[in-house]
Amino acid sequence: QTNFGGLYDASPQWVTQLQVRYLAPSGWRWYTADDPEGVDEQSLACLLNGCFDAQGVRYISLPRPVIATKVRLHPYAWHQRPGLRCEVHLADAAAASDEASGRFMSPCLRLEQGAALAGMASSTLREALEERLKERSKREVDLQVQAEQQRGDLERRLEEAIARAEAAEARASSAEADLLNAKADIE
């Protein structure tokens, strides 16, 4: 049996740290958080944190935008093997120039905020639905209790009516017997 490794390996694998290289007008540069022009040496490049498990999503927003036509992600450290899925969100040059005026918000940050907002909305909706289910269950229990009370009340009233009817029948029988005795005495 041959072990192909890599993507054929079913064990969890992910990149824990990575570096970014991009093609700027001046050539290929390594991304740094400090130098707007980037650097030529990989050893000076910024080290970005990747994922911490195989299923998690990691949003990496570069501290400063870069003007580039191509981007390369270089895995630096990984778990088992360097497995990586990624999305790269871009902004046009006008948005990148807005960084200096303080109006810049990276697409990744907007995406992360949107995902966080959607998560909060989802949990709020879930809490509201759970509350409605609790209220509905409480109403159903209250209705069952009320129905049982009404049933008990009706059963009690029926027993009282039956007892009154039996007492009236007994009185009627006694009155009939007295009437027959009185007739017999008269004859």
Image (cartoon, helix red, strand yellow):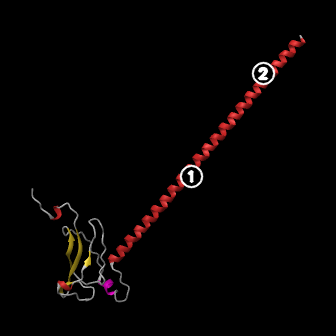
Q: Quadrant of the N terminus?
A: bottom left
Percent across and percent down for residue 136 are 53, 53
Q: Residue furthest left?
A: 1
Circle 1 packing at 10 Å, graded few (<14), some (14-19), many (20+), is few
Is 9 placed left or right of 103 in the picture? left
138 in relation to 153, above or below: below
The image quadrant that residue 89 belongs to is bottom left
23 in relation to 84, above or below: below
Q: Which residue is rendered at x = 70% and y = 31% of the image?
A: 162
**Kind of residue at disc 1:** Arg
Looking at marks 2 and 1 on the same chain, the residue that comes earlier in the sequence is marked by 1
Percent across and percent down for residue 183 are 86, 14
Q: Nearer the viewer, residue 29 or 184?
A: 184
Residue denoted by label 2: 173
Residue denoted by label 1: 139
- Measured Cα–Cα span from mark 2 to mark 1: 50 Å
The image quadrant that residue 82 belongs to is bottom left
Q: Residues at badges 2 and 1 in contact (C-beta under 8 Å)?
A: no
**Kind of residue at disc 2:** Ser
